[in-house]
Amino acid sequence: MKRVGTILLVVGVLVGALALTMKTTVTTESIYIGGQPYGGGQQVYNIGLQADQRNTLLVAGVLVILGGILVVAGKSQGGATTTADPATGERKCPQCAEYIKSEAKVCRFCGYTLPPIVQTEEMVRWRCPDCRTEVRVGDTRCAKCGRKLDFGGALPPSKTGWRCPECRSEVSEGDRRCRKCGRKLDFG
């Protein structure tokens, strides 16, 4: 819906620009009175051309208004769901991108009314730090290698690596403290 609105908005602006460049005058012809040319070559407004310009501007205005409505409606639906990080109990506000508590209904930074949380499979599954087998949040031991799991420490690996739960900076699995904020890390 947002894409259609954007297309209508652009087409409306282009049609409006075309309408504003339309020619609405005509050149008069010379009239010969007594063999002498009289009154030729003057520019006068043509009512028919002016009506065509007005109609084209009206169509452009309607397209711009409809496109604007669809773009605004598409933005309000675009962030209809957000995901929360179960390890930190936080989620990112879709409006201002600040981290807020998962249970919040309104962002404390910008006042945005937050959409409901949707839990994805990526949020539910982590990997064991030893054998890299997928484990569910809440499991106390890895089913494959038997390692004791603790989800209160460092966040599970993302596509780029482990993250500090405090400042979300990248940390290595062997780090005892976060290099950026100094938080003590526990990989289980």
Image: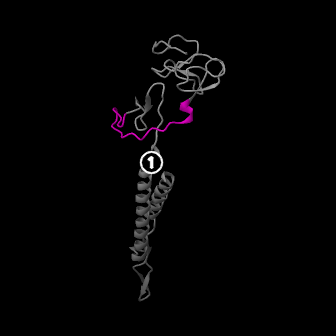
Q: Is residue 147 magenta?
A: no
Q: Is residue 116 magenta?
A: yes
Q: Nearer the viewer, residue 144 or 91?
A: 144
Q: Nearer the viewer, residue 26 or 4?
A: 4
* In this view, 105 is above or below 154: below
Q: Quadrant of residue 21?
A: bottom left
For disc 1, the neighbor class at 10 Å (few under 14, some 14 to 19, many from 20) is few
Q: Quadrant of residue 95?
A: top left
**36 left or right of 151 in image:** left
* In this view, 91 is above or below 23: above
Residue 23 screen position, x and y as percent: 45, 68
* In this view, 183 is above or below 78: above
Residue matched to label 1: 77
Amino acid type for the residue under numbered disc 1: Gln
* In this view, 44 is above or below 105: below
Q: Main secondary structure of the magenta part?
A: loop
Name the secondary structure under disc 1.
Answer: helix
Q: Residue at x 33, y 32 (%)?
A: 108
The residue furthest bottom is: 34
Residue 101 screen position, x and y as percent: 39, 29
Q: Which quarter of the rendered picture does the C terminus lie within?
A: top right
**Start-end of magenta stretch:** 104-124
